[in-house]
C-alpha cells in the first residue's frame, strides 16, 4: 500500500506544471548554454559592432567636412591669386615703357626751347627707335609689306585697287604687326589689277583681291552718281 502511494506521488510531480525534464538520453556538457543565452550573447555582439560602425561613420563625416572646407579655401585663394595676376600682368611691360615716356618728354621740351624743329624731330626719332626695340623684345615685330609680291589675305587687307599687276601689292597703307606666331594686326595695302588700262571698269582682277577691288569700285560708282 505504501509503495503504491510513493509511485503515485512521483508520477504527479513529473506531470506537474513547471517541471521540465531532460529528454531521454540527452546529457548537458559543463558550461553549455541554452538557446536563450546564445541569443543574448549574439545581441550583445551585434550592438558592439553597430556602435563601432557608427563611430567610424562619424569619423568619415568629420574628415569629409574638413576636406570640403580645405577645398573651398583653396578655390578662394586660387581665384584671388588669378585675379591679382590678371590685374598686374602688364606691370613689367608698363615699367619698361616709362623710360620711353621720359625720353619723349625730353624731346618735346628740347623742341619747345629751340627755334628750329630739328631737336624735336631728332628726339622723337630716338623715342620711336626705342619703342620699336621694346616691342621686338616683347615678341612684337612688323610684317613685311610685300611690295611687288602677290596679295596674301592671311596677313593683309586690300583697301584700294591701284594700277599694276593683278593681286600684287603696290603700296603699304598701314603697317601690320605680328605677336610671336599670331597676327596682331594685318597690313593694310593697295593692290594693283592685271593691266594698266586707264578705265578701271575694264580691268580684270582674279584671286583673293578680286572681291575687294570689286567692292571698292562699286562704292566709287555710288559716290560718283
Image (cartoon, rainbow, N blue to C red):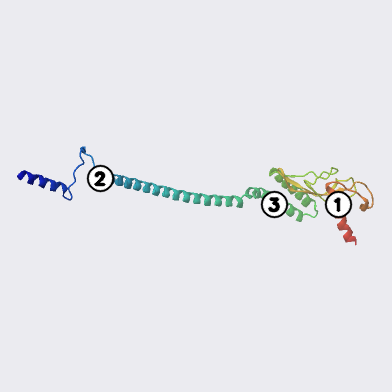
> At x 58% / y 50%, what residue is drawn?
82
Question: Which residue is disc 1 drawn over?
Answer: 213
Alpha-carbon span between mark 3 and mark 2: 97 Å
Specify which label sits upstream in the sequence, 1 or 2: 2
Mark 1: secondary structure:
helix
In front of the other: label 1 or label 3? Answer: 1
Specify which label sits upstream in the sequence, 1 or 3: 3
- In the figure, is residue 43 to the left or right of 23? right
What crowding class fits label 2: few (fewer than 14 Cα within 10 Å), some (14-19), or many (20 or more)? few
Percent position (x, y) of residue 151? 83, 45
Question: Which residue is disc 2 drawn over?
Answer: 37
Q: Are marks 3 and 2 in contact (CB under 8 Å)?
A: no
Foreground residue among 200 and 113? 200
- In the figure, is residue 68 to the left or right of 29? right
Percent position (x, y) of residue 173? 82, 50
Alpha-carbon span between mark 1 and mark 2: 105 Å
Would residue 113 be seen by someone viewing this image from the given angle? Answer: no
Specify which label sits upstream in the sequence, 3 or 2: 2
Question: Which residue is disc 3 drawn over?
Answer: 101
Mark 3: secondary structure:
helix
Q: Are marks 1 and 3 in contact (CB under 8 Å)?
A: no
User: Residue placed farthest to the left in the image?
Assistant: 1
What crowding class fits label 3: few (fewer than 14 Cα within 10 Å), some (14-19), or many (20 or more)? few
In front of the other: label 3 or label 2? Answer: 2
Q: How many marks?
A: 3
- In the figure, is residue 39 to the left or right of 100? left
Amino acid at each position: 500500500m505504501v509503495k503504491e502511494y510513493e509511485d503515485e506521488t512521483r508520477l504527479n510531480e513529473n506531470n506537474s506544471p513547471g517541471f521540465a525534464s531532460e529528454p531521454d538520453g540527452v546529457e548537458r556538457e559543463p558550461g553549455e548554454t541554452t538557446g536563450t543565452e546564445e541569443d543574448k550573447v549574439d545581441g550583445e555582439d551585434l550592438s558592439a559592432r553597430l556602435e563601432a560602425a557608427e563611430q567610424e561613420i562619424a569619423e568619415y563625416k568629420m574628415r569629409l567636412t574638413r576636406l570640403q572646407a580645405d577645398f573651398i579655401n583653396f578655390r578662394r585663394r586660387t581665384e584671388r591669386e588669378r585675379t591679382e595676376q590678371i590685374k598686374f600682368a602688364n606691370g613689367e611691360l608698363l615699367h619698361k615703357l616709362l623710360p620711353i615716356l621720359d625720353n619723349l618728354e625730353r624731346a618735346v621740351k628740347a623742341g619747345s626751347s629751340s627755334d628750329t624743329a630739328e631737336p624735336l624731330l631728332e628726339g622723337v626719332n630716338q623715342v620711336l627707335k626705342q619703342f620699336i626695340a621694346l616691342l621686338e623684345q616683347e615678341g612684337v615685330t612688323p610684317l613685311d609689306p610685300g611690295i611687288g609680291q602677290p596679295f596674301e589675305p592671311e596677313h593683309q587687307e586690300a583697301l584700294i585697287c591701284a594700277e599694276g599687276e593683278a593681286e600684287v601689292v603696290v603700296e603699304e597703307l598701314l603697317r601690320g604687326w605680328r605677336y610671336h606666331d599670331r597676327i596682331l594686326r594685318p597690313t593694310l595695302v593697295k593692290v594693283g589689277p592685271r593691266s594698266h588700262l586707264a578705265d578701271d571698269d575694264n580691268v580684270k582682277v582674279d584671286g583673293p583681291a578680286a572681291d575687294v577691288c570689286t567692292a571698292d569700285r562699286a562704292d566709287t560708282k555710288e559716290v560718283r552718281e
